[in-house]
Image (spheres, rainbow, N blue to C red):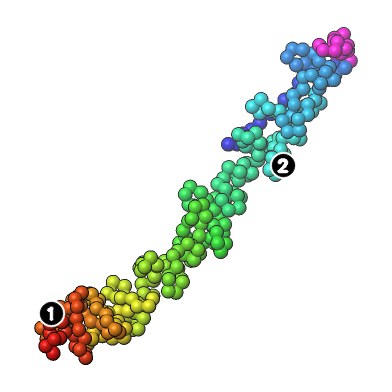
Amino acid sequence: MAFKHSGHKSYLTSTMTDRFDCYYCRDNLHGKKYVKKDEKHVCTKCFNKLCANTCAECKRPIGADSKELHHKNRHWHEDCFRCAKCYKPLASEAFNARDDGKIMCGKCGSREDGNRCQGCYKVVMPGTQNVEYKNKVWHEECFTCFECKQPIRSQSFLTKGEDIYCAPCHDKKFAKKCFHCKQPITTGGISYQDQPWHSECFVCHTCHKSLAGARFTSHENNVYCVDCFKTDVAKKCHGCKNPITGFGHGTNVVNYEGFSWHEYCFNCKKCSLSLANKRFVINGDHIHCPDCAKKV
């Protein structure tokens, strides 16, 4: 808020022709200069020493011969009444009296009271390009990414604590990394064996078809679609000669001396009795139950 100071303040001084004494030192004031203050007649020496107001700026007494300015019970020498920022004399100018006691010219007061940039702490002047976020303001060029230090301007940004990041830097620093390509996963993605993957990176090891949302199986740290696993990886049943995939009808497998069978294929050749978890006899490429083996 702008004020006008209360004007110069001076005291009555005159020269005595009849005998008259100083109120304090009792010196005869006849023919001397004196000051009348509070109905008391005081020599200039005693006035300067005992009665003069103290300048709010230089902290020295404001003597009887000095021009004095005052505002709200504070006093200044005329030459001391200046803007606290630019030091412009304010004896005949409008000024701002701040809560911290500083006196400023109108221009400096406006700058001081304006919004301050959170980047450079300088005033954001009205009409300049700026960014507002959470009741704080930045010059546009001061609103920068914490990591790359580049102005964000109209780009999207993310925060981590009190720090602000452009989207690429945030992804690079904080996003999960794909287990396959080691690049940040910014959207979507899938999880397999507690590891994150891009959907486009989670593909069949053989045909490279995407496995996101599809049935698949793994072998020796590689993943395969069902068709490629059957064709290229799965063992062949010694009984039916079809791949043993673990999909579809029956998932249990019987292994014996380097051969494998679907559990439902591990039957006596003669009576078709299931021999899973039972005694059996191998006769060439065929298996028999003990009873049928005796008859062969």
Label drawn at residue 233: none
Per the image, the residue denoted by label 1 is: 273
- Span colored in magenta: 16-31
> For this view, does 213 lie left or right of residue 84?
left
Is the N terminus in the top left, top right, bottom left or bottom right quadrant?
Answer: top right
Q: Nearer the viewer, mark 1 or mark 2?
A: 1
Q: Camera-side residue: 183 or 277?
A: 277
Judge whether residue 24 is colored magenta.
yes
Give the x, y percent position of residue 272: 12, 82
Up-down: is 272 above or below 93?
below
Q: Residue at x 29, y 75 (%)?
A: 216
Q: Quadrant of residue 52?
A: top right
- Residue drawn at (58%, 42%), measured in percent from left and top? 113
Instruction: For marks 1 and 2, give the CA distance.
Output: 109 Å
- Residue 37 falls in image quadrant: top right
* x, y percent for residue 45: 85, 20
Where residue 172 sits in the image (x, y, percent)? 49, 66
Name the spot of residue 261 as percent of width and height, x first. 23, 82
For label 1, the crowd category at 10 Å Cα-Cα, with few meaning under 14, some 14 to 19 and many 20 or more, is: some
User: What residue lies at 50% left-to-right and 63% top-to-bottom?
Assistant: 173
> Which residue occupies 55% across, 47% down?
115
Residue 182 in the figure: left or right of residue 88: left
Secondary structure at numbered mark 1: loop
Q: Secondary structure at mark 2?
A: loop
Q: Earlier in the sequence, mark 1 or mark 2?
A: 2
Residue 87: mark: 2
Three-letter residue code for mark 2: Tyr
Judged by its main secondary structure, the magenta piece is loop
Instruction: Tell which residue pokes out farthest to the top in this image.
Output: 19
- Under mark 1, the amino acid is Leu
- Taking 225 as reference, is 14 above or below it? above
Between 142 and 7, the residue placed more toward the observer is 142
